[in-house]
Image: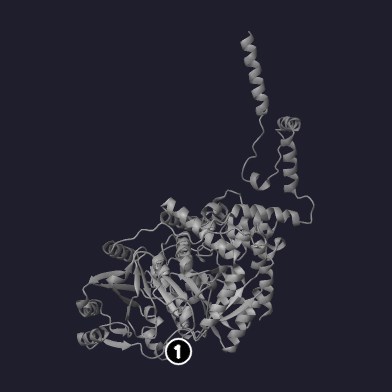
Amino acid sequence: MKTKFSKRIELALADSQLRMNFRGAMDFLRNKRQLAFNDVEEWQALRKKGAAIRQDAIQRLPELLTQLEHQCQQNGIQVHWAEDGNEANKIILNIAQQHNAKQVIKGKSMATEEIELNDFLEKHEIDCIESDMGEYIVQLDNEKPSHIIMPAIHKNTAQITDLFEKKLGISTPSGDVDALIGVGRRILRERFEHADIGISGVNFAIADTGTLCLVENEGNGRLSTTAPPVHIALMGIEKVIPNIQVLPTLQRLLTRSATGQHITSYLNLISSPRKKGELDGPKEVHLVLLDNGRANISQDEKLQSTLACIRCGACMNHCPVYTRIGGHAYGSTYPGPIGQVVMPQIKGFKQEGELLDACSLNGACGEACPVEIDLPELIRTLRHRKQESSSTCWSKEVFIWFVWTKIHLHPWLYRQATLLMAVFRTLNLNYPKGWTRTRTMPKAAKMSLHRQVRERSKTKKKKENE
Amino acid sequence: MSEARKAIFARLNQRKISTKKHDFQAPLATKHLNKTEAKKLLIEKLQENRAEVYSIPSTSLTDTLTTIATEKGYKTWLFGKNLSGAKTASKALESVSNEISVIQYDSDYETLREVLFHQVDVSVTSVKAAIAETGTLLLIPDKNEPRMMSLIPPVHIAILKQSDIVTSFQQVADNPPWQGKNMPTNILFISSPSKTADIQQTIAYGAHGPKELIVLIVN
């Protein structure tokens, strides 16, 4: 029986345009990152420090979150706690309704994707528009982002030109990226001017000063958090950091890993709503702290490091599977290696467990991770857990490895097995179908290597004796 | 206290906490540049990121602004109250041609909104410090120079004192120009005009914020 995930993979692999778009984008991002980290020693020292900062913060989560909450409240930011997506959505809706809000403008935020905020607000007749150019394009085509940093990476310029023509009725000269961005700017500025509420994510939250840090290039994050009278920020509880002194390290790791930039156009630090006498900025700032499975993850010593992630996307850029199938095939909020690790832990093996199969254990993601998350090890651990938790006693995979282990532990069995393979070598066993559909199954040799060596030494001895 | 908060903390506090200490405060090897090197690197990095940079003596600030006004044809200028010499510059600008007008950001955003979005061509702000390593300007908006000044107008002219250039972001973080935990409402690190590469990795400037960033380094 075909699972949905494998069907999606099949479709993605057959789409040559999609594969070209991803190949181009991944090569581009990988090269840029490589150039940004050309000093290997510096990269290693930076990475080690980044890992220490994140691991320390995860270890001290209760302390840091208490401090963050307290300091934000001191600064006049209203703090809310949400156990899951549903609660977070309700908190945000509630704030919106209190202000009679009809129009929401959003800066890029993966956490809001995670809780599917747009759909929720729309059901309650609140218009929620994405303002990051990539997110705007994706929203216009009723899609989800296919990459956590570059949401519209699966589309090329021509496809976006067509989309604008079809959905907005605005035609632009073919291949003119500046014109397309100009259209987006014009439409979205109008929304910034009149939105009732701005919603953003948070890249890092500084506990000891109660400061929200947003990293971006476009300025839409700044507009979303400055123009509307109310700003709501949503963040996963793992994004807290102790103080501003650790920010430069994390900022360097994040932007270089993500886009190869030494720094983004804007780093925006927000510590309070508009103070008395100030002339602009939102009059209310809300911070919604989202758990959605994170506290559970932090309870598991083997999986805890999942939370160290700074969402740079380097693991997907370096994943040979992601590069070939693209982000949508995963069908999850977070695609690629970090998605394979996060999603099954948030939503359970039953719903997202099959994501774990899309990995060749090549280890590229672990090497690329700027905060030393051992992603391959996490994937292996989760695969193991998934197997343990599965109700069927023996899957095909377990059976094969069981037999493999037995054979390799017993020389006699091993010899018999190779003998059998040689005898039945002409049998056309099309067992791994995904493989043999487009390739010929290799045939076993007439004689095993062991036997060949033995025979050869026999003849050699014979010759010597003669 | 909310139910959700209680439940989240209950789960967090149930954890077996490993006692392993993570040395997250160990300083990284840093290079310190002297004033000349820092300025040179800052200019190089800013230009790399598409900013226009001019190094000028403090006496020619007004002249530089009027030259920019004439050459680029910027008509409506926005000033705050932090900049020393703003008054002189405003007068000089308005005397260049009667098409040029100067607006002060002196009422609240709600009142000024339409003007900000639809009339202002260029805004002029001060800069608190600059980071050479990445070509970054540090702005701390306040009631005299509100947040929107470096965001809505299509051109942002930033005026930096040469003595305020430092080498790294870490230096700023270790010795911040604000008082301890008393954080300003908003702190901005600006390194280029607004840009995006969201369409097929092609860089386009002026995504949502300023299309141009002009930096005047004043000796």
Of the 4 image quadrants, the one containing the N terminus of chain A is: bottom right
**Label 1 environment density (alpha carbons within 10 Å; few <14, some 14–19, many ≥20):** few
* Nearest the eye: A141 or B197: B197
Residue A37 percent coordinates (x, y): 43, 55
Taking the image as shown, residue B79 lies to the left or right of residue A420, namely: left
Residue at x-position 60% and y-position 64%: A59
Q: In the rendered view, would you say B83 is above or below B191?
A: below
User: Which residue was labeled with disc 1?
Assistant: A276
* Nearest the eye: A427 or B37: B37
Rendered image quadrant of residue B75: bottom left
Rendered image quadrant of residue B33: bottom left
Of the 4 image quadrants, the one containing the C terminus of chain A is: top right
Residue A34 percent coordinates (x, y): 44, 54
Residue B156 percent coordinates (x, y): 33, 77
Residue at x-position 75% and y-position 41%: A403
Name the amino acid, label 1.
Answer: Lys
Rendered image quadrant of residue A97: bottom right
Chain of the residue under the numbered disc 1 shown in the image: A
